[in-house]
Image (cartoon, rainbow, N blue to C red):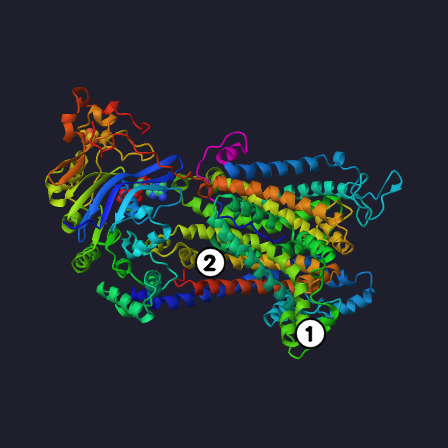
């Protein structure tokens, strides 16, 4: 899909650099502690949703009653477009596969692609941003121009083009997931690049970095020791928000017949594309279940990302102020001249 | 100061020129990227006709399309074409891309117009409500709504709407831009805008207009919701900012009624950043249009891209995508210009 | 003597703060007659602006206001909201400290005037409104040719004069001027002060002039009120107070100014108090060199000495017993007790 970072509060780089805050050992605990009320609810709900899908993805084989491509079990053919029943909780597809199993395996595909894509974009985008921001010069200018151009372009089209280039659209099982992940990566590298580069440019001017430089520290040491630590703190927020977006991009690719090859894995977007033509017959189960799965997972990831952003960006944190109720006057107020 | 008065028109001009100059490298980078990336796949003729034509036939076609020349000379040829508005000719059905741009581009334009209207109609008032009830229940609910609007894939929303309003309730149509007879009628006109609603109003009767509208509602809502959530949040956050602005408090201190303060001072000022960010939404809308048009068989550019993709006609894909790059760059330029013109201060 | 235009009794304005109510104004009483200028001085954060805004009925969300503000014989705080809006602007005007940001950047100066005139004097025709606005501007030295310019086309001094003209165009009986010259350079400051003096002569409104500058008080005010931590600790005729300050804080204030021979206020030993948990009883006691036991326990009475009023136990020693009179050493002062 093509929304870039969902518009965070504030415009441009809404992801603020946290300034040397102490973090506890348990990741996420800080975040939960720093929130309250609605924000905490959002964070917890989002985390639970993501956890749920993670479990489904990891144990897909145990959870799904059938394989994602099976149209029969024990020699018995399921039948096409069977309505939900005790046999097939979510019915069967026009290809005669069990919708429930496909939804479950779809979670696995989505998780694999997303994790891979996010890791790849970080691995490419962060160092690129560091180098570009630190050294500046013409390379920096070119990279900024290129990433800006990519950023302004419909990301789905970008992903499609890359996906065509990589594998002609599809290939073997792992290749399918890897190539889908790479296509998505291309979309998100510019975002990491931008944020990290801008943060690096800012950090480069910090007094302690200046000091390190005058003391003769090598650029590599400066970047890894002084700048990286500061800059990298924004990455979790972008990563989560991008992950949500990446799920939509993957589904969009699948919907248009790209991304994961149907033989390589179940993919929600692909199932939805098949389901569109079922709607005219009033058949809803082939589309509604994978659609709900996508929406739910994206909601979960986005909630986590947004709450993280709120937490790391104290300006956005809602501190709900309590309406003041004035207490009755103190006795011995100066109007009564009493001693 | 007097000097500021004089220089303001000058700075606007400088800004416009620099901004326009940025369009060129952007388009160039994208066109170049698309060209080379799609050539990595290999020979477009092979992709489109491989297995269906004899090697000899393929060689003939390759020569005719100039694809046997060195890559760089093809690239140069292509660039020159683009600067003249020539984006090539599709391989599979031999249609000029520029023709597709006019016919199907109009369809996409019509769709995005309605979608933006939906997004504004939904996002702006709801954003105002959210700002007004900041951190209270309506705000929380709307925030969740915005997340949901973002999280539901375009094609899934489209599918749901189709199921509900086309299949079950039959209020609206599930696909196409108009019923076949209407389509023929309103397309068979002298200066054809290819924008159906305009054609229908100009040449058709009320039932034609009604037919076109009933085809438009669902796709427009589907694509509109994609950015409605973004608009909502933008309006909300910017309103919250301007509602705290010094000049807003000053207006209150002058006894301007609160409603008017919000409408005339806070809201108007909040819209400037909203307009600026709308420039970024052009890409989002065009990306969403690909999915919406496929879902509703709306024959716009996105539909055409998907169509040529499925036929592996990469020359056509490349042409349309390059054109989209130009459209994106130009539209975001125009929106930036609009934002600069609205704002009397003209920043930058 | 004529009846006061503004008669404020025991006004409180408490803000909602993240760690509890901020007692920014906590029981102030004063009155202003027609044509009188009352200077309001005090350290930064003592609640001067809050007081000025509270008079106008401008309190942010979550804040509470009580007491009584009688303006022109009516108690503003018990007026219906709509009525109060009418008084605001028409009856009383507010001039702000920061002229640069107080005009709507998207509105021409002319629109500011027509708006305010339309709101308060709807019967005025367009031409009449224009004449009124141009008159007000001309009297402040803004030429009519600039009427249709945007705020950003004016300098700070000019914008402040436009703000003043905007307040004056409705001919209010009472004007709050909140540090109208602080943001401006000295020449412009002198100009604005001349304008204020001119306004006094011509329209004779009551003016509350908030300032940091005791020089301005001496020059432009009839009476002065000294504010400390949300309370007016001393008020009276300027000359009397400058000659014989009764309250230790006033004394410290005047001393610090004179000893450093500048016109700005300078800090007094000790930190300004936390208004969420203000010091018990006399709020100045942690910093007062004359502090006695009673000062931390019982609120000091307001005592009239000649034409001055001050709230300090030193002026009412006859009402304290010997134990209460015992000096309280600084160490014993509880830092931030519950009020
Ligand atoms: N909106 C607000 N919410 C909470 N606290 C506030 C708010 N505005 C001001 N305060 C606090 O109220 C106290 C009084 O502020 P106020 O602006 O009235 O002081 P002041 O005397 O005008 O200071 P200055 O001389 O700096 O203008 C300060 O402690 C300030 O931090
Ligand atoms: S009451 Fe006590 S502490 Fe307060 S000013 Fe007077 S002497 Fe000082
Ligand atoms: Mg102030």
A108 is higher (above) or lower (below) than C300: below
Residue holding disc 1: B186
Q: Nearer the viewer, residue A178 or A81?
A: A81
Helix, strand or loop status at disc 2 = helix
Q: Residue at x 76, y 41 (%)?
A: A100
The stretch in magenta equals A16-36
Q: Main secondary structure of the magenta part?
A: loop
Q: Nearer the viewer, residue C312 or A18?
A: C312
Residues packed near mark 1 inside 10 Å, few (<14), some (14 to 19) or many (20 plus): many
Q: Nearer the viewer, residue C218 or B33?
A: C218
Residues packed near mark 2 inside 10 Å, few (<14), some (14 to 19) or many (20 plus): many
On-image quarter of the C terminus of chain B: bottom left
A287 is higher (above) or lower (below) than B34: above
A127 is higher (above) or lower (below) than B288: above
Residue holding disc 2: B271
C23 on left or right of A14? left
Q: Quadrant of residue B189?
A: bottom right
């Amino acid at each position: 899909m093509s929304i870039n970072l969902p518009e965070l509060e504030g415009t441009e780089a809404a992801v603020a650099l946290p300034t040397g805050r102490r973090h506890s050992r348990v990741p996420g605990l800080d975040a939960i502690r720093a929130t309250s009320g609605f924000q905490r609810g959002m964070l917890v709900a989002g985390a639970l949703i993501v956890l749920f899908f993670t479990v489904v993805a990891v144990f897909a084989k145990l959870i799904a009653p059938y394989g994602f491509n099976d149209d029969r079990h024990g020699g018995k053919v399921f039948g096409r477009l069977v309505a939900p029943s005790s046999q097939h909780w979510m019915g069967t597809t026009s290809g005669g596969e069990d919708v429930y199993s496909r939804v479950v395996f779809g979670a696995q595909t989505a998780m694999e692609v997303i994790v891979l894509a996010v890791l790849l974009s970080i691995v490419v985008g962060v160092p690129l941003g560091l180098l570009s921001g630190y050294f500046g010069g013409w390379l920096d200018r070119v990279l900024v121009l290129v990433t800006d151009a990519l950023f302004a372009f419909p990301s789905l089209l970008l992903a499609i083009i890359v996906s065509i280039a990589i594998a002609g659209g599809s290939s073997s099982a792992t290749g399918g997931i890897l190539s889908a992940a790479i296509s998505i990566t291309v979309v998100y590298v510019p975002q990491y690049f931008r944020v990290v580069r801008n943060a690096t440019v800012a950090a480069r001017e910090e007094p302690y970095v200046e000091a390190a430089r005058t003391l003769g520290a090598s650029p590599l040491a400066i970047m890894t020791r002084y700048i990286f630590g500061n800059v990298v703190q924004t990455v979790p927020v972008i990563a989560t928000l991008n992950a949500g977006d990446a799920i939509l991009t993957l589904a969009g690719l699948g919907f248009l017949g790209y991304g994961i090859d149907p033989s390589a894995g179940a993919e929600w977007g692909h199932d939805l594309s098949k389901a569109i033509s079922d709607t005219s017959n009033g058949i809803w189960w082939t589309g509604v279940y994978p659609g709900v799965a996508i929406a739910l997972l994206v909601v979960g990831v986005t909630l986590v990302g947004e709450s993280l952003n709120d937490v790391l960006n104290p300006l956005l944190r809602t501190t709900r102020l309590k309406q003041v109720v004035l207490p009755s006057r103190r006795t011995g107020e100066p109007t009564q001249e009493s001693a | 100061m007097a000097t500021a008065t004089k220089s303001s028109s000058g700075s606007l001009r400088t800004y416009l020129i620099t901004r326009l100059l940025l369009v060129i490298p952007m388009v160039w980078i994208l066109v170049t990227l698309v060209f080379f990336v799609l050539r990595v796949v290999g020979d477009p003729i092979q992709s489109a006709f491989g297995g269906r034509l004899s090697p000899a036939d393929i060689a003939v076609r390759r020569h005719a399309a100039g694809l046997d020349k060195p890559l760089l000379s093809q690239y140069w040829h292509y660039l020159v074409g683009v600067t003249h508005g020539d984006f090539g000719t599709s391989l599979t059905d031999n249609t000029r891309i520029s023709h597709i741009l006019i016919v199907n581009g109009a369809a996409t334009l019509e769709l995005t117009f309605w979608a933006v209207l939906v997004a504004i109609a939904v996002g702006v008032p709801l954003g105002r409500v959210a700002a007004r009830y900041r951190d209270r229940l309506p705000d929380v609910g709307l925030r969740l709504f915005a997340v949901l609007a973002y999280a539901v894939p375009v094609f899934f929303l489209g599918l749901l709407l189709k199921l509900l309003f086309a299949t079950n309730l039959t209020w609206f149509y599930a696909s196409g831009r108009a019923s076949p007879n209407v389509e023929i009628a309103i397309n068979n006109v002298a200066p054809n805008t290819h924008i159906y609603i305009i054609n229908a109003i100009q040449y058709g009767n009320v039932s034609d207009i009604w037919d076109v509208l009933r085809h438009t509602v669902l796709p427009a809502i589907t694509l509109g919701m994609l950015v409605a959530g973004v608009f909502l949040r933008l309006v909300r956050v910017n309103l919250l900012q301007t509602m705290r602005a010094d000049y807003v408090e000053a207006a209150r201190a002058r006894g301007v009624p609160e409603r008017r303060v919000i409408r005339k001072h806070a809201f108007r000022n909040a819209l400037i950043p909203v307009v600026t960010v709308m420039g970024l939404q052009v890409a989002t809308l065009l990306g969403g249009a690909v999915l919406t048009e496929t879902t509703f068989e709306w024959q716009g550019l996105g539909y055409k891209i998907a169509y040529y993709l499925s036929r592996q006609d990469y020359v056509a894909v490349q042409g349309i995508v390059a054109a989209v790059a130009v459209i994106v760059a130009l539209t975001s330029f125009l929106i930036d210009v609009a934002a600069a013109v609205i704002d009397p201060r003209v920043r930058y | 003597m004529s009846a006061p235009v503004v008669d404020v009794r025991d006004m409180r304005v408490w803000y909602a703060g993240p760690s509890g109510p901020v007692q920014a104004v906590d029981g102030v009483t004063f009155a202003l007659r027609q044509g009188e200028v009352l200077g309001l001085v005090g350290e930064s954060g003592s609640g001067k602006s809050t007081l000025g805004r509270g008079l106008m009925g401008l309190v942010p969300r979550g804040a509470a206001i009580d007491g009584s503000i009688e303006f022109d014989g009516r108690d503003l705080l018990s007026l219906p909201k709509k009525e109060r809006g009418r008084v605001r602007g028409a009856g009383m005007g507010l001039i702000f400290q920061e002229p640069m940001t107080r005009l709507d950047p998207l509105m021409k100066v002319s629109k500011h005037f027509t708006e305010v005139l339309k709101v308060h004097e709807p019967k005025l025709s367009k031409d009449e409104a224009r004449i009124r606005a141009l008159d007000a501007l001309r009297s402040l030295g803004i030429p009519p040719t600039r009427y249709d310019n945007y705020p950003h086309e004016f300098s700070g001094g000019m914008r402040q004069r436009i703000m003043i003209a905007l307040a004056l165009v409705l001919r209010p009986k009472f004007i709050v001027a909140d540090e109208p010259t602080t943001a401006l350079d000295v020449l412009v400051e002198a100009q604005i002060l001349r304008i204020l003096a001119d306004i006094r002569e011509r329209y004779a409104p009551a003016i509350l002039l908030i300032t940091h500058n005791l020089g301005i008080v001496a020059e432009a005010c009839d009476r002065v009120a000294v504010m400390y931590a949300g309370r007016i600790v001393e008020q009276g005729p300027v000359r009397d107070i400058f000659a014989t300050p009764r309250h230790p804080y006033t004394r410290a204030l005047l001393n610090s100014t004179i000893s450093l021979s500048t016109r700005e206020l300078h800090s007094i030993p000790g930190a300004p108090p936390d208004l969420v948990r203000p010091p018990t009883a006399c709020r100045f006691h942690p910093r007062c060199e004359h502090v006695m036991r009673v000062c931390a326990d019982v609120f000091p009475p307001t005592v009239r000495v000649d034409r001055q009023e001050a709230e300090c136990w030193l002026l009412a020693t006859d009402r304290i017993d010997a134990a209460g009179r015992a000096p309280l050493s600084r160490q014993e002062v509880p830092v931030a007790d519950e009020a």
